[in-house]
Image (spheres, rainbow, N blue to C red):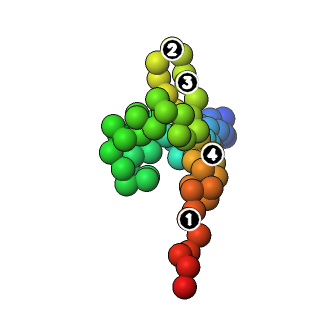
């Protein structure tokens, strides 16, 4: 291979690896209903009901699509902690 071909191959591999990393980060930080249901071990229908009741943080993509930021969900989980019972 020529030096130029080697360079093209290296750049192409770098771009692929970089895009894989970015896609992975995006996919793990933004949830759909189904992904969040798996994460929280709940049914998607429960999450839909909670969205309608504004019980958890979400945002809309377009008019109908609902998405959830993992960072906001994690903070919401922390806020849901219940203190221990009395002795």
Q: Do the residues bearing badges 3 and 2 touch, measured as CB atoms within 8 Å? A: yes
The crowding category of the residue bearing disc 1, from other C-alpha atoms within 10 Å (few below 14, some 14 to 19, many at least 20), is: few
Q: Which mark is residue 60?
A: 3
What residue is shown at x 61% (from left), y 59% (from top)?
78
CA–CA distance in space, label 3 to label 2: 7 Å
C-alpha distance separating marks 3 and 4 = 14 Å
Q: Earlier in the sequence, mark 2 or mark 1?
A: 2
Give the residue drawn at x 58%, y 29%.
59
**Relative to 49, 66 lies left or right:** right
Q: Residues within 10 Å of mark 3 (few under 14, many from 20)?
A: few
Q: Quadrant of residue 87?
A: bottom right
Q: Residue at x 53, y 75 (%)?
A: 85
Tags 3 and 4 in contact by the CB under 8 Å rule?
A: no
Q: Which mark, by number, is residue 72?
A: 4
Q: Work out how far the residue at label 4 is from the one at label 2, CA to CA, in angstroms.
A: 21 Å
Q: Nearer the viewer, mark 4 or mark 1?
A: 1
Q: Nearer the viewer, residue 85 or 56?
A: 85
Residue pictured at 58% horizontal, 39% vertical: 57
Residue at mark 1 = 82
**Eye-nearest disc, 2 or 1:** 1
- Give residue 63's mark: 2
| Rendering coords of residue 10 (x, y %) | 62, 43
Question: SS for tag 2?
Answer: loop
In contact (CB < 8 Å): disc 4 and disc 2: no
Q: Foreground residue, 11 or 86? A: 86
Rendering coords of residue 82 (x, y %): 56, 65
Q: What secondary structure is marked by label 4?
A: helix
The disc, 3 or 1, on the residue closer to the chain's N-terminal end is 3
């Amino acid at each position: 291979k020529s030096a130029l071909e080697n360079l093209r191959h290296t750049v192409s591999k770098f771009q692929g690896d970089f895009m894989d990393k970015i896609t992975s980060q995006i996919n793990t930080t933004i949830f759909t209903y189904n992904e969040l249901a798996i994460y929280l071990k709940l049914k998607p229908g429960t999450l839909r009901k909670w969205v309608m009741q504004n019980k958890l943080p979400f945002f809309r993509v377009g008019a109908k699509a609902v998405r959830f930021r993992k960072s906001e969900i994690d903070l919401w989980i922390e806020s849901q902690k219940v203190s221990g019972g009395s002795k």
